[in-house]
Image (cartoon, grey):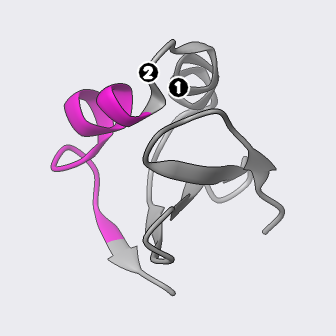
Amino acid sequence: MNREPVGSSTIVGIGYDEPSQTLEVEFKTGSVYQYYNVTLALFEQLMQASSKGQFLAYQIKNAYPYSRVG
């Protein structure tokens, strides 16, 4: 999945696959996580958020199934 670089203190890049509703996040630690069943609207809100790390923490983590893939 292609990830778009983002300005964040904790996140390097974010990718999204609309057909599978999979959000992929690469952290500055080097780990990569995929979050499942994430709607396009939520992904777009994440990309517009002034703090992507905070948005991810409060709106996505622990609210959607996920797995570490890297």
Residue 29 higher or lower than 40, as above or below: below
Q: Residues within 10 Å of mark 2 (few under 14, many from 20)?
A: some
> In terms of depth relative to the viewer, which is nearer, 64 or 68?
68
Residue 6 higher or lower than 22, as above or below: above
Q: Mark 1 points at which residue?
A: 46
Which residue type does callout 1 highlight?
A: Leu
> In terms of depth relative to the viewer, which is nearer, 27 or 16?
27
* Percent position of residue 3, x then y: 77, 57
* Percent position of residue 60, x then y: 31, 39
Q: Nearer the viewer, mark 2 or mark 1?
A: 2
Is the Cβ of the residue at disc 2 closer than 8 Å to that at disc 1?
A: no
Would you say residue 46 sits in the magenta stretch?
no
> Quick one: SS at disc 2?
loop
Residue at image position (51%, 87%) is 70
Which residue type does callout 2 highlight?
A: Ser
Which of the two discs, 2 and 1, labels the residue nearer the N terminus?
1
The quadrant of the image that shows the N terminus is: bottom right
Residue at image position (21%, 29%) is 58
- Which residue sits furthest bottom? 70
Give the magenta part as a residue range. 53-66
Left or right of 3 in this view: 59: left
Residue 64 higher or lower than 67, as above or below: above
- Which residue sits furthest left? 62
Q: In which quarter of the image is residue 22?
A: bottom right
Residue 50 higher or lower than 36, as above or below: above
Residue at image position (66%, 52%) is 13
Left or right of 39 in this view: 57: left
Q: Mark 2 points at which residue?
A: 51
Report how far apart the C-alphas of labels 2 and 1 lie in the structure.
Answer: 8 Å
> In terms of depth relative to the viewer, which is nearer, 28 or 66?
28
- Which residue sits furthest front? 9
> Quick one: SS at disc 1?
helix
